[in-house]
Image (cartoon, rainbow, N blue to C red):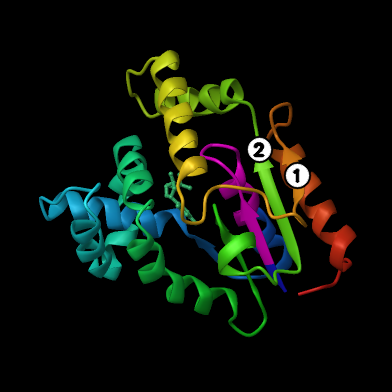
């Protein structure tokens, strides 16, 4: 079975996708990492992430870059959001994601357009949301834990700007597929959000589906 988990930054979709993959014994792909790798490679090349040619050139990033911890930074997230608006970039990353989604036995993918573009035939689609306040609080706590000196207001402003860019781009904007389950994690802790996601999948395909 293919499970598509989409939603905005810091909604909890990555945590949920990882947990679903472990629970159902499926491989997992965080597709945001691919866009982050393109953004980072573009910066390493000295390119401009808003330029389609520079962004497309960066799609030839080495596989090893995907494991670079720097990809998890807010700066890489911002660069990813900028390179991801170019249709050329989305096209270049399409095959890799599609192949992962359609591998024998199935897979869990998380991103922005998995249920709408990459795997519209997915058996289960979750669209994970949370209020900007809840998401900013989570990022704030994560970053403070990591010893970073950040302001909650700056994080909230950055999240809102990124949401706006992801939602308003012409190509594959962030939007729930009509057949997606909406999962709002604003008031849920990690365990409760995971339990709810597992129940939604099981409700759709049964307890033993793989
Ligand atoms: O999920 P994330 O924060 O790692 O994603 C970083 C950026 O990558 C996000 O702002 C938009 C882009 N992205 C995308 O356009 N399509 C995807 N399937 C995944 C991420």
Instruction: Tell me, for residue 21, which label it has, or none.
Output: none
Q: Position of residue 69 (x, y in %)?
A: 32, 48
Residue ranking furthest to the bottom: 104
Q: Is residue 194 above or below residue 100?
A: above
Residue ranking furthest to the left: 46
Q: Position of residue 16 (x, y in %)?
A: 65, 49
**Number of marks in the rendered image:** 2
Q: Pick whichever of labels 1 and 2 is earlier in the sequence.
A: 2
Based on the picture, tell me whether residue 182 belongs to the magenta stretch: no
Label 2 element class: strand
| Mark 2 C-beta closer than 8 Å to ligand 1 | no
The quarter holding residue 64 reads bottom left
180 or 87: nearer the viewer = 87
Q: Position of residue 121 (x, y in %)?
A: 70, 72
Q: CA distance from mark 1 to mark 2?
A: 7 Å
**Which residue carries the number 1 mark?**
182
Label 1 element class: strand
Pointer 1: residues within 10 angstroms few (<14), some, or many (20+)? some
**Quadrant where the C terminus is found in the figure:** bottom right
66 or 11: nearer the viewer = 11
Pointer 2: residues within 10 angstroms few (<14), some, or many (20+)? many
Residue 190, can we see it? yes
The answer to whether mark 1 and mark 2 are in CB contact below 8 A is yes
Based on the picture, tell me whether residue 4 belongs to the magenta stretch: yes
Residue span colored magenta? 3-18
**Which residue carries the number 2 mark?**
129
**x 55%, y 41%: residue:** 8
């Amino acid at each position: 079975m293919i499970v598509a988990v989409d939603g905005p930054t810091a909604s909890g979709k990555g945590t949920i996708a990882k947990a679903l993959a472990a629970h159902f014994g499926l491989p997992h792909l965080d597709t945001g990492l691919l866009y982050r790798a393109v953004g980072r490679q573009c910066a390493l090349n000295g390119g401009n992430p808003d330029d389609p040619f520079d962004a497309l050139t960066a799609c030839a990033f080495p596989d090893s870059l995907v494991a670079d911890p720097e990809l998890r930074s807010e700066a890489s997230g911002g660069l990813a959001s900028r390179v991801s608006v170019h249709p050329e970039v989305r096209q270049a990353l399409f095959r890799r994601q599609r192949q992962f989604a359609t591998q024998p036995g199935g897979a869990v993918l998380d991103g922005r357009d998995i249920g709408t573009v990459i795997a519209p035939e997915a058996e289960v689609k979750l669209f994970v949301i949370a209020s900007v306040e809840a998401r900013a609080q989570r990022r704030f706590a994560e970053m403070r834990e990591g010893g970073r000196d950040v302001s909650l207001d700056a994080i909230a402003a950055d999240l809102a700007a990124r949401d706006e860019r992801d939602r308003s781009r012409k190509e594959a904007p962030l939007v729930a597929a009509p057949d997606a389950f909406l999962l709002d994690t604003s008031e849920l802790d990690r365990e409760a959000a995971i339990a709810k996601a597992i129940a939604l999948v099981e409700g759709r395909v049964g307890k033993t589906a793989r």
